[in-house]
Image (tube, rainbow, N blue to C red):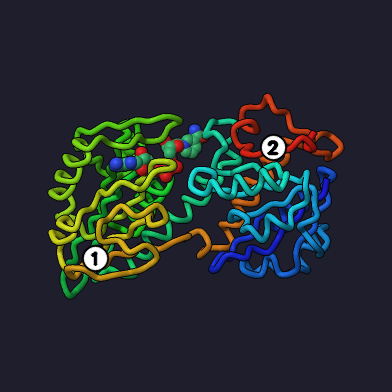
Amino acid sequence: TTVGVPREAGAGERRVALVPKVVERLRGRGVEVVVESGAGLGALIPDELFIAAGASIGDPWSADVVVKVAPPAPEEIGRLRTGSTVIGFLAPLTSPETVVALRSAGVTGFAMESIPRISRAQSMDALSSQANVAGYKAVLLAAERSTRFFPMLTTAAGTVKPATALVLGVGVAGLQALATAKRLGSRTTGYDVRPEVADQVRSLGAQWLDLGIEAVGEGGYARELTEAERAEQQQRLEEAITGFDVVITTANVPGRRAPTLVTAKAVQGMRPGSVVVDLAGESGGNCELTEPGETVVKHDVTIASPLNLPASMPEHASELYARNVSALLELMLDEHGALAPDWSDEVLARSCITRTEETS
Ligand code: NAD
């Protein structure tokens, strides 16, 4: 099997789908790897390091399997060979046109975000590996924008109280945000509509905010709230948020617009100099005043909505993502390194979003 690694074309996308260490590993499984010249430059990986790992530099698009980070653009789909396979974030729920284009191009597609979140597939869980980067970075951004210290300081000039940080939506990114905010010395609180998260929040030394609203959906995700639940949640959060210096929001429901958790009124109630970092900007945002991709100041509160934070830490984000992609790819390889997907495998069946006859 040949595996192609294109240079990511999206604006600001600095990650690459395979890194040299993982190339070496795949070579050991009998796979040929073709890397587009400059594919690793965003992550500061020169072509030479890929070559040293056993890859060749050339046209990645004619390979049997093309590995990507971001969904392929229409022009890129046009370069994929009929009967080939593409692995990457393919956004099947939010970008159905990509699915249609892959199908008409006769390409088999595996979407990293559709891999079931079961124990056996943890090594392939790219949503988690990238969400960890986002949660970590969100706290650093908040600290950078804050007019106040995170840690408690006892100095000759007096004592400074620790900042208080509230994380709304405590999935993978939220847990990492709680852990990072704690390491910086703030007092932390977590909130979610899945009650099972309470113990995880407490185990990170954070308080659990209980608003009495439960909304457990399928596959470990939350469900959308009803109109009445939403109104009640917003009102209770308005009261709770007032006391916090930093609010980090990560709430998402797969395939839906992100829920509004922080209303304009809640922002108005925050102390001047406080910060909201909204990680749900890509799906519309969790704060009513969020402008996706922008940092705005409203009522003297900074509201930042950074997009694609994982790309801002391209070295480790690529390293983790490459391991995720490789684990999925290796699941499909036979002992000679040929592509032989077992379609009865739940992981492959669920992550496969288009399938051609030619993929055996
Ligand atoms: P996500 O990005 O879809 O959402 C982030 C968080 O927002 C979730 O915790 C969700 O409950 C919460 N949320 C949604 N609507 C909300 C609302 N109205 N109010 C408050 N919070 C709201 O989630 P994710 O980080 O991708 O994780 C989803 C689940 O997958 C978690 O249960 C996680 O533990 C689980 N998971 C399981 C495995 C595994 O292998 N077993 C691996 C990774 C993740």
Q: Which circle's residue, 1 or 2, is located before the other in the chain?
A: 1
Q: Which residue in the rendered view is the most extreme toward the bottom?
A: 157
| Left or right of 288 in this view: 30 | right
Q: Which residue corresponds to the image point at 33% horizontal and 44% vertical from the top-left? A: 169
Element under label 2?
loop
Q: Is residue 170 visible?
A: no
State which quadrant residue 29 falls in.
Answer: top right
Q: Is residue 121 visible?
A: yes
Q: Which residue corresponds to the image point at 84% horizontal and 34% vertical from the top-left? A: 335
The residue carrying pointer 2 sits among few (fewer than 14), some (14 to 19) or many (20 or more) residues within 10 Å by Cα, namely: some
State which quadrant residue 92 falls in.
Answer: top right
Residue bearing the label numbered 2: 355
Q: Position of residue 217 (x, y in %)?
A: 38, 30
Q: Position of residue 230 (x, y in %)?
A: 22, 40
The answer to which of 23 and 57 lies nearer the viewer is 57
Q: Amino acid at mark 2?
A: Arg
Q: Which mark is residue 294?
A: none
Q: Which residue corresponds to the image point at 60% horizontal and 45% vertical from the top-left? A: 99
The answer to which of 143 and 183 lies nearer the viewer is 143
Q: Amino acid at mark 1?
A: Leu
Q: Position of residue 64 (x, y in %)?
A: 79, 48
The residue carrying pointer 1 sits among few (fewer than 14), some (14 to 19) or many (20 or more) residues within 10 Å by Cα, namely: some
The answer to which of 54 and 85 lies nearer the viewer is 85
| Left or right of 360 in this view: 184 | left
Residue bearing the label numbered 1: 153
Query: Which corner quadrant holds the N terminus?
Result: top right
The answer to which of 173 and 85 lies nearer the viewer is 85
| Left or right of 60 in this view: 165 | left
Total numbered labels? 2
Element under label 1?
strand
| Left or right of 159 in this view: 12 | right
